[in-house]
Amino acid sequence: MLSNVTLQSPVSDTWQWHPDIARGYSVRTGYQLLTSQEPPILDFSDNLIWHSQLPLKVSILSWRLIRDRLPTKINLLNRGIISTADTYCSAGCGQLESVQHFFIHCETFRIIWQQVRFLIGVAGVDHHSLHAHFVQFTNYLGGTRARLSFLQLLWLLCVWMVRNERNNRLFNNSHPPNTELIDKVMFHSYWWLKANNIVFVFGCQQWWSDPLTCLSIG
């Protein structure tokens, strides 16, 4: 950015307002600049991040995840915090740790998506893009609002659990069986839905065996 800049020692540094260099900044020119810009085009996945039945911290994590703003090892390398030798996946699969790899394609954690698809009775493959994966997953059961909301909740909860397991492996040297992931997803989804729905009368065993019927969306 500064390769074409020539420093002039006898000239003092000054601020310039590019929309009106002659007269400088004014509220009018600032307003004109803001209103003349095209509104940002939001990806459809942005509309799915916020869910009223999940803790806000889960949606915030997903917001950062979709924008690749989590401290994965690739991102830490790009910021000069770690070396290339330290960029391998925390799950020990031998691949570089990017958000797409860790949350979708890692051999250790991709089993969660297979198990969840089996749980809701659908077949599919994982998309490479996180945005597309999110949208694809939430539309597995059709376009009704109740089904969309439930799959939206499941996706957000799955990435939350994967992030927690990643941190436990990295910082606590914890290596629980991968099969525990789906149990944690079902446990948290049950209690978070029950806490926000006073008419949710089903027990854990019924929820584990057939969540779609419990929600009357099967």
Image (cartoon, rainbow, N blue to C red):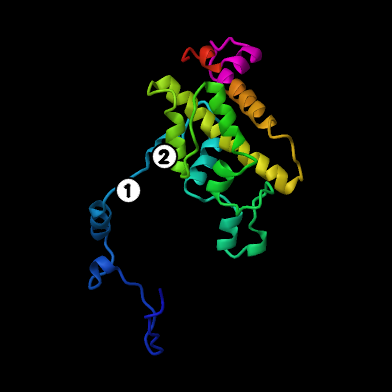
Q: For the magenta stretch, what is the residue range?
A: 193-210
Q: According to the image, label 2 marks what residue?
A: 46
For the residues labelled 2 and 1, the Cα–Cα distance comes to: 12 Å
Would you say residue 202 sits in the magenta stretch?
A: yes
In this rendering, does residue 52 appear at all? Answer: no
User: On the rendered image, what quadrant is the N terminus found in?
Assistant: bottom left
Residue at screen point 38% across, 81% down = 5
Res 80 label: none
Q: Quadrant of residue 116?
A: top right
Residue 192's place in the image compared with 64, above or below, is: above
Would you say residue 124 sits in the magenta stretch?
A: no
Residue 86's place in the image compared with 176, above or below, is: below
Tally of marks? 2
Residue furthest out toward the bottom: 10
Residue at screen point 37% across, 86% down = 11
Residue 23's place in the image compared with 170, above or below, is: below
Residue 100 percent across, percent down from the top left = 53, 47
Res 40 label: 1
Residue 218 percent across, percent down from the top left = 48, 14
